[in-house]
Amino acid sequence: MEFISLKNVIKQYDDGQVTALNRLNLTIEKGSFISIIGPSGSGKSTLLNMLGALDSPDAGEIVIDGINLAQEKDLSDFRRDKIGFIFQLHNLLPNLTVEENVEIPLIATKLPEKEKKERALKYIEAVGLLDKKDTKPNKLSGGQRQRVAIARALVNNPSIILADEPTGSLDSQTGQMVLDILKNMHEEYNVTLIIVTHDNDVAKLAERTIMIKDGQIIEDKQN
Ligand SMILES: Nc1ncnc2c1ncn2[C@@H]1O[C@H](COP(=O)(O)OP(=O)(O)OP(=O)(O)O)[C@@H](O)[C@H]1O
Ligand SMILES: [Mg+2]
């Protein structure tokens, strides 16, 4: 089933001097696991931002799970209910503890406080950081921060996980742990998993790999 569809999507920056996405077309099936590769500056993060409705295209159409993003007035509900975003720079809030950071996506939900806490702790445990739950991000290593960012992305039980270089700053063991968590979400809960990576071994774990260059898809293959 066609779950995500992008048609002729254009995204420019700097008053049109930079074309980050250049008439990009892409369809993604529900529950699939896709990796996105390509040189630095080719448009990978820009594409992920479009898929997560964090930014809007200058032209073209994006439909996700039946929702035409351009026609929605308020995309915050869409993001909160459907998307788990793991950023390239993990941008945790420095004045909040690990537990509080992980609870951020739940703030606007109607869940009881007790349930928010239980959910946050479940994912903090899953990434192996229960002993750090009351610690602030500046006391954590880069890999630990990345794992907090992953717990935060999973805590709202998203149907789509968008991960921008989730293993980029990690040693191989921690990277493997992160990949195992993400793959498990994909396999067990049929989450649609889209990972941007520079690592070919990580890219090959996906069912399908898309290569982007100059804002266009130049290769699209099943692994
Ligand atoms: N906020 C912005 N303002 C201006 N230009 C931008 C902005 N964000 C991205 N760009 C430009 O758009 C192009 C695509 O950037 P993008 O971040 O999508 O690349 P990327 O493939 O994720 O690269 P990397 O692998 O280095 O993360 C680049 O030329 C970049 O300089
Ligand atoms: Mg990027």
Image (spheres, rainbow, N blue to C red):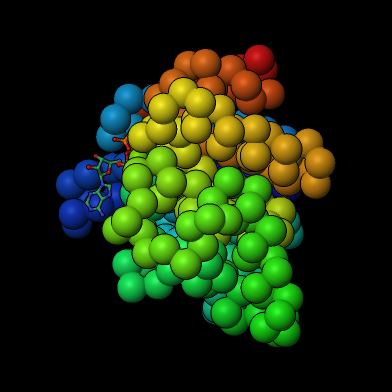
Q: Residue at x 48, y 57 (%)?
A: 132
Q: Residue at x 78, y 36 (%)?
A: 187
Q: Is residue 203 above or below residue 195?
A: above
Q: Quadrant of residue 197?
A: top left
Q: As drawn, is 174 to the left or to the right of 214?
A: right
Q: Is residue 217 above or below residue 133?
A: above
Q: Please state, as top left, top right, bottom left or bottom right, where the C terminus lies in the image.
A: top right
User: In x, y percent, where is residue 203?
Assistant: 54, 22
Q: Residue at x 56, y 70 (%)?
A: 103
Tell which of 50 and 57 is nearer to you. 50
Q: Is residue 204 above or below residue 157?
A: above
User: In x, y percent, where is residue 138?
Assistant: 29, 58
Q: Please state, as top left, top right, bottom left or bottom right, where the N terminus lies in the image.
A: top right
Query: Where does ligand 2 appear, by image quarter?
Result: top left
Q: As drawn, is 15 to the left or to the right of 70?
A: left
> Is any atom of residue 85 visible in this view?
no
Name the outermost residue toward the front. 131
> Is any atom of residue 144 visible in this view?
yes
Q: Residue at x 19, y 56 (%)?
A: 15
User: In x, y percent, where is residue 204?
Assistant: 58, 17
Tell which of 17 and 158 is nearer to you. 158
Q: As drawn, is 213 to the left or to the right of 130?
A: left
Q: Quadrant of residue 120?
A: bottom right
Tell which of 21 and 78 is nearer to you. 78
Tell which of 80 and 99 is nearer to you. 99
Q: Is residue 43 above or below residue 221?
A: below
User: In x, y percent, where is residue 181?
Assistant: 65, 39
Label count reads 0
